[in-house]
Amino acid sequence: MGTNDLTALNLAISIYHFVYDVEMLLGMGGAIKYSICQSQREQKNADIMFTNTIYLAIMFSILFFVTGLCFQRI
């Protein structure tokens, strides 16, 4: 492997970890907030929290997908 290959690999790994971390942040944070609302018997707030987490995950997924499409080489 040359220097350009190693540079590309390091950039790709960093980007992958960023995307993974954002999705884990949403998943774990949403699950914790949902569990707290469920334990306090606030079903309406728990449903809102779950729905908002799903919407945010979809929004970030679309954002990352479009960003990936914009920076790909043809």
Image (cartoon, rainbow, N blue to C red):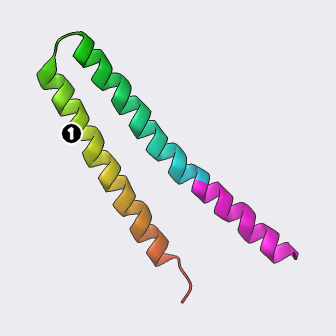
Tag 1 secondary structure: helix
Q: Quadrant of the N terminus?
A: bottom right
Indicate whether 2 appears above or below 46. Answer: below
Indicate whether 73 appears above or below 26. Answer: below
In the image: residue 21, left or right of residue 67: right
Farthest bottom residue? 74
Asked if the stretch drawn in magenta spans residue 71, the answer is: no
Image location of residue 56, percent across then percent down: 31, 46
Q: Nearer the viewer, residue 11 or 47?
A: 47
The stretch of residues the image draws in magenta is 1-16
Secondary structure that dominates the magenta span: helix
In the image: residue 73, left or right of residue 39: right
The number of callouts visible is 1
Name the image quarter holding residue 28: top left
Q: Which residue is mark 1?
A: 51
The residue at the point 40 percent across, 37 percent down is 27
Farthest right residue? 2
**Amino acid at dot 1:** Thr
In the image: residue 10, left or right of residue 55: right
The residue at the point 40 percent across, 30 percent down is 29
The residue at the point 52 percent across, 76 percent down is 71
Q: Residues within 10 Å of mark 1 (few under 14, many from 20)?
A: some
Q: Quadrant of the C terminus?
A: bottom right
Name the image quarter holding residue 54: top left
Farthest left residue? 44
Image location of residue 66, percent across then percent down: 40, 70
The residue at the point 45 percent across, 45 percent down is 23
Image location of residue 4, percent across then percent down: 80, 76
Image location of residue 19, percent across then percent down: 51, 53
Indicate whether 72 appears above or below 17. Answer: below
Asked if the stretch drawn in magenta spans residue 10, the answer is: yes
